[in-house]
Image (cartoon, helix red, strand yellow):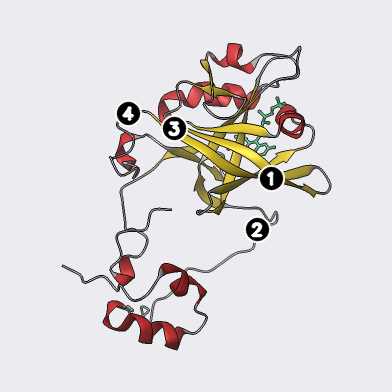
Amino acid sequence: MVEQPKAVSRRRFLESSSAVALLTALGEHVCAADPPSGTIHPKRISLAEPGPMLPPVPAILLTVKGKRDGSDEISVVWTFVVNGKPPQIGVSVHDRHVAGMLIKEHGEFVLNVPTAEIVKPFDTVDMNTGKIADKFALSGLTRERATKVDAPTVAESPIHVECRVFDTIPVPPVRSIFLASVVATTVREGVCDESGRLIVPAVQFFGMTAGSGEFYTMGRKVGHIGQTVGRTDIKY
Ligand SMILES: Cc1cc2nc3c(=O)[nH]c(=O)nc-3n(C[C@H](O)[C@H](O)[C@H](O)COP(=O)(O)O)c2cc1C
């Protein structure tokens, strides 16, 4: 069994800018593998069109309450973690999207994690606009209500992250970043263990590759955060 480096807090680990200080602090827990020597890397080419060519990034079904006389909105967005404690996330939304206008009005929304089982309704949501149709009705997804914020949710999604906006950053020319506190997270039974830790194989997550526009589920587990320092307790 690997002994835990109790004396070194994760924060100190992250804040340390000195590799020497870090190695001293972690002692024998660091098993720095030598970089492979003599590897011949394939030739690199520059693409004519630069772009965010990234591995599959999970996109989320964002739900937000509609206008007084309009339908609730579902939209597809990418999201990012701003902070673990307190839990905060961010989304970047095009100003002409219905979701962006409604988030500005209500200040609350839900991130509904989609699964491979609902990849078709997910694409229907993306390919249609709330300006001319109710995307809940079009996609066949089931509307429910969130527990803490005044917003709809997608019943088919196993994980709901309920969010309240605390800051909005205009990103010229056409976007706004909404920074939001996570005020409640609800999961279907079987998705987390008793300690609230996610059981990854219980959910068929998928993401989209920017660079080919394809949806991929997750592959096999190849490691975990803190493995190089013998830590198994970090989950974010
Ligand atoms: C994988 C993926 C990620 C997306 N991420 C975003 C995003 O982060 N922000 C955004 O404004 N639109 C994003 N979109 C596009 C919008 O979700 C989509 O155009 C939206 O459904 C438009 O709805 P509306 O016309 O009702 O506003 C994404 C689409 C896909 C397929």
- Residue drawn at (70%, 30%) of the image: 99
- What residue is pinned by disc 2? 47
Q: Vertical placement of 97 versus 171: above or below?
A: above
Tell me if label 3 and label 4 are in contact, CB under 8 Å: no
- Residue drawn at (59%, 11%) of the image: 137
**Within the displayed image, which quadrant is ligand 1 positioned in?**
top right
The tag earlier along the polypeptide, 4 or 2, is: 2
Closest to the camera, between mark 4 and mark 1, is 1
Specify whether tag 3 is near ligand 1 (CB below 8 Å): no
Of the pair 163 and 19, the residue shown nearer to us: 163
- What residue is pinned by disc 1? 166
The tag earlier along the polypeptide, 2 or 3, is: 2
The crowding category of the residue bearing disc 3, from other C-alpha atoms within 10 Å (few below 14, some 14 to 19, many at least 20), is some
Q: Amino acid at mark 4?
A: Glu
Q: Position of residue 186 (x, y in %)?
A: 44, 32
Tell me if label 3 and label 1 are in contact, CB under 8 Å: no
Tell me: 172 left or right of 161. right
The circle on residue 189 is 4
- Residue drawn at (52%, 26%) of the image: 147
Q: Amino acid at mark 1?
A: Phe
- What residue is pinned by disc 3? 186
Quadrant position of residue 201: top left
Instruction: Report how far apart the C-alphas of labels 3 and 1 lie in the structure.
Output: 21 Å
Instruction: Report how far apart the C-alphas of labels 3 and 4 lie in the structure.
Output: 9 Å
Closest to the camera, between mark 4 and mark 2, is 4
The tag earlier along the polypeptide, 4 or 1, is: 1
Please state the total of marks drawn on the protein image. 4
Query: In the picture, which quadrant includes the N terminus?
Result: bottom left
The tag earlier along the polypeptide, 3 or 1, is: 1
Q: Position of residue 78 (x, y in %)?
A: 59, 41
Closest to the camera, between mark 2 and mark 3, is 3
Q: Secondary structure at mark 1?
A: strand
